[in-house]
Amino acid sequence: MATDAHTRRVVAQVAKELTAQLPERTTELANLFLEEIPAFQGEEAVRELMAASTAANLSTMFDLLQHGLPTEQLVVPAAAAAYARRFAQRDLPLESLLRAYRLGSVRFNQWCLRGLSQRELDADVVLACTQEIVQVAGRYIDQISEHLVEIYETERKLWTQRTDAARAIALRTVLDDEALDLGTAEAMVGYRMRGWHVGAVAWMDKDVPDTARRLESAAQLLSTVHGRRPLAVLSDDHTLWAWVTSVEPIRLDHLGLAAALEASGGPLGYAPRMAIGEPAQGLDGFRTTHREAMAARSVAEAAESSPDQVARVVSFAEVSIAALLSENLDSLRTWVRRTLGALARDDEATERLRETVRIFLETGGSFTDAAARLHLHKNTVHYRVRKAEEIRGRPLSEGRLDVEVALVACRQLGSRVLSQAG
């Protein structure tokens, strides 16, 4: 059986020979990565950094074998750390980076075994040397990969924060300064605004953990539904602004998006909510659809006091009347109370009456159709309508259009426009 000392000498000799071949081995591995991993096929400067990272890792691994250095206190080579950070900055997948290390480890072991096969060694020596090479290479890859994951995730978080902060400032300027022309706005944000846009606002409650990651998942879901990556930026720690763009008017699958958002919340239900603007074109449309999404969010939050009104996705088209009216809530509140009288009271019994009246008017004043919609007996609908007229103090036919609009405002804005019971 070979002695440890003899094993070490053989392994060191093989490593020394490979060290002399470092430029060729680096090129071999770099070409392998470019061929096997699409994420590595970036710009020339990035490929040069990848080659430097590969050379640094190989040099370290050769030194470990040649000099018998311990792996416990390994430090990630500077070039390898820089490449991991660049990978994160370009939003390239971490799995591609780790795959390169796995591929490199396999090729490294092949080189070493080939070096052993070129020597006249007893079988037990070959076995002992192979075990040491594989163990050292495995420990190196494991430790370096662990460090790289930390470097990548830290840089991704920091880079996202930096770029989001800068882009958020640019976006606020574009949204607020209507004197900006199209070219200037596109240059500031780094995004084409000549097509059709749909604005979206996703948000989480402030007490939900890990809100940034959950909101980023909402942007990914938009990408899945729309088929293209949206422009997305965190406007604060619990709100995401996003736009999807196309050369043609866009209609998002709201039901599919709502289901996907619901599923993303997991067992605890920590899913984002989302408000969607209407499709609009060009720079003006970019601003308009965002304002509509913000207005729809405001209406959605107002409805949170009524659990049956809470929706995962709310579109401006669904709440446009309430959204437009709510721009001056004080005046709207006064008008609703004047229009509905005591029918605007904020209690459950009056809410049932308002909902019955709303459906009754929607069905053209048909007691039969309203009863079918509400799953009630026709006589019950008749009673509630008469009771509502009594509470209002005048017939529903008097100012009927105003009554219908006021009922929509009550349903969608809830306590913001209702009178306190009592």
Image (spheres, rainbow, N blue to C red):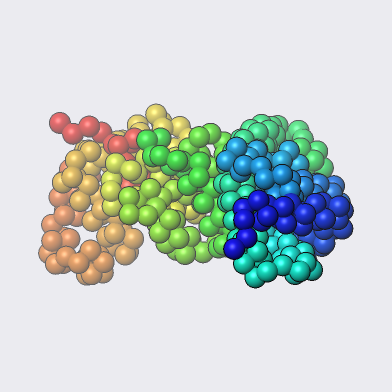
**Which residue is drawn at the image coordinates 50% and 34% (left, top)?**
237
Position of residue 247 measured from the top left corner of the image (x, y, whole percent): 72, 61
Position of residue 41 measured from the top left corner of the image (x, y, whole percent): 79, 59
Q: Quadrant of residue 385?
A: bottom left
Q: Is residue 172 left or right of residue 43?
A: left
Residue 171 appears in the figure: no
**Which residue is drawn at the image coordinates 66% and 42% (left, top)?**
69
Q: Residue furthest top?
A: 330
**Which residue is drawn at the image coordinates 76% and 33% (left, top)?**
179
**Which residue is drawn at the image coordinates 13% and 61% (left, top)?**
380
Position of residue 282 measured from the top left corner of the image (x, y, whole percent): 72, 50
- In this orientation, which residue lies closer to the viewer: 334 or 415? 415
Position of residue 189 measured from the top left corner of the image (x, y, whole percent): 73, 40
Image quadrant holding the C terminus, namely: top left
- In this orientation, which residue lies closer to the viewer: 250 or 324? 250
User: How many numbered circles are shown?
Assistant: 0
- In this orientation, which residue lies closer to the viewer: 266 or 366? 266
Query: Looking at the picture, does residue 328 appear above or below residue 271?
Result: above
Query: Looking at the picture, does residue 10 appear above or below residue 290?
Result: below
Q: Is residue 387 left or right of residue 398?
A: left
Query: Looking at the picture, does residue 319 appear above or below residue 112?
Result: above
Image quadrant holding the N terminus, namely: bottom right
Residue 259 appears in the figure: yes
